[in-house]
Image: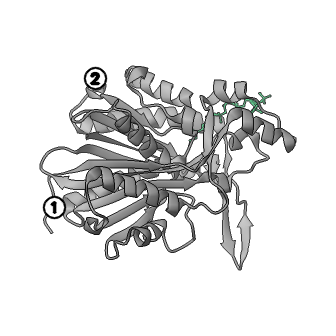
């Protein structure tokens, strides 16, 4: 198969669990466990007002499937036409098979290549960059790129420093080959030396959990590094594409904390009004946060065809990446 000049996003979708938990509800639930927090602390420090939390049976593949169906519908493409499925997740249904394979089975498109990408909150940027490369080299022609998470499963509900920050959900896009742009530039990075500042350092061995099966984070260290590397990688993709911050119509960062979003926009010199913000509604949904924000921006009519979008992710690993594209 001949590669395409560009890859383009031609459809978006998203899915959230039914249960929406406000800060007030969470504060009351945590108080019953003897954990003290407040709506004021959560809003002031993070901008989060609510999050959606999965019930015990809802999985990443089910959320990813729902988001993928919506993305296919909005693209006007049948599942059978898809030849590549990449799912970014750090909360897969199983050790294996991959979440992407489980989604493929639900979609009924056997034959398409399917694999997961594990780059935590940068996962969606990694997955879009990977699909772009596959499409440009002719390894695939129509891709489903999904970010799906049930982060609530790996939270320590006795750790107020992390459990108030995350939510569950999924977002998806369909990408196809095109003669017109499209993805203009993408860059991915990692620094494994920083693994300890954000991790879930547990595993399964001999039928038991070994290590620590809950997310742990040095919040201030992650915050500082995130603002620095987001700025660097954003400038890198803009330079690669021969663009400047003034060319960006919408900044769509990983939705971890409104203060990180504001700092990233300010450092780049992009008006805050040009940032898609969903962290107040969804909290931090890790790999799902960028596609959830993208789908929200598209469906709400804020994002218009032909506009330049700068997607940027940062997360555990430590990983970071950005994609500049025209929609
Ligand atoms: O998705 C991957 C990327 N992740 C991120 O980008 C997260 C980055 N980090 C952050 O967003 C912020 O560091 C946090 C929101 C996690 C924390 O905000 P902070 O301003 O850095 O606060 P802190 O960790 O320095 O804690 C300040 C205080 C501490 O009390 P003392 O020691 O000053 O008395 C904490 O114990 O806030 C306390 N605290 C809380 N208080 C009420 C921590 N969590 C809570 C809480 N409720 N939930």
The residue labelled by disc 1 is 3
Q: Closer to the N terminus: mark 2 or mark 1? A: 1
Q: Residue, x 55% and y 58% (percent of image)?
A: 90
Task: Using residue 293 as the reference point, say whether residue 303 is left or right of it.
Answer: left
Q: Quadrant of residue 52?
A: top right
Q: Which mark is residue 322?
A: none
Q: Residue, x 71% and y 78% (percent of image)?
A: 207
The residue labelled by disc 2 is 246
Please state, as top left, top right, bottom left or bottom right, where the C terminus lies in the image: top left
Can residue 318 be seen? no
Foreground of the two, 257 or 243: 257
The answer to whether residue 253 is above or below residue 144 is above
Q: Cα distance, mark 2 to mark 1?
A: 31 Å
Q: Secondary structure at mark 1?
A: loop
Q: Quadrant of residue 270?
A: top left
Task: Using residue 152 as the reference point, say whether residue 83 is left or right of it.
Answer: left
The answer to whether residue 46 is above or below residue 176 is above
Other-residue count near label 1 (Cα within 10 Å), few / some / many at <14 / 14–19 / ≥20: some
Tell me residue 44's x, y (percent). Answer: 65, 24
């Amino acid at each position: 198969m001949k590669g395409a000049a560009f890859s383009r996003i031609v459809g978006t979708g998203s899915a959230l669990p039914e249960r929406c938990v406000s800060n007030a509800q969470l504060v009351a639930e945590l108080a019953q466990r003897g954990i003290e927090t407040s709506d004021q602390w959560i809003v002031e420090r993070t901008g989060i007002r609510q999050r959606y939390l999965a019930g015990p049976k809802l999985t990443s593949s089910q959320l990813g499937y729902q988001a993928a169906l919506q993305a296919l519908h909005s693209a006007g493409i049948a599942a059978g036409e898809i030849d590549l499925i990449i799912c970014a997740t750090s909360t897969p249904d199983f050790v294996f098979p991959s979440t992407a394979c489980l989604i493929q089975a639900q979609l009924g498109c056997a034959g398409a290549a399917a694999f997961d990408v594990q780059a935590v909150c940068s996962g969606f940027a990694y997955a879009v960059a990977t699909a772009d490369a596959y499409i440009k080299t002719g390894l695939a022609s129509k891709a489903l790129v999904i970010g799906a998470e049930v982060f609530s499963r790996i939270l320590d509900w006795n750790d107020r420093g992390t459990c108030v920050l995350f939510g569950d959900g999924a977002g998806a896009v369909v990408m196809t080959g095109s003669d017109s742009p499209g993805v203009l530039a993408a860059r991915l990075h990692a620094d494994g030396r920083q693994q300890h500042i954000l991790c879930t350092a547990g595993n399964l061995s001999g039928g038991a959990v070994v290590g620590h099966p809950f997310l742990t984070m040095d919040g201030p260290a992650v915050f500082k590094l995130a603002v620095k590397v987001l700025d660097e990688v954003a400038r890198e993709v803009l330079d690669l594409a021969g663009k400047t911050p003034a060319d960006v119509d919408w900044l769509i960062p990983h939705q971890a904390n409104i203060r990180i979003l504001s700092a990233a926009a300010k450092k780049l010199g992009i008006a805050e009004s040009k940032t898609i913000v969903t962290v107040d509604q969804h909290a931090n949904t890790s790999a799902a946060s960028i596609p959830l924000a993208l789908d929200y921006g598209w469906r709400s009519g804020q994002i218009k065809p032909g506009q330049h979008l700068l997607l940027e992710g940062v997360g555990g690993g430590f990983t970071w990446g950005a994609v500049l594209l025209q929609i």
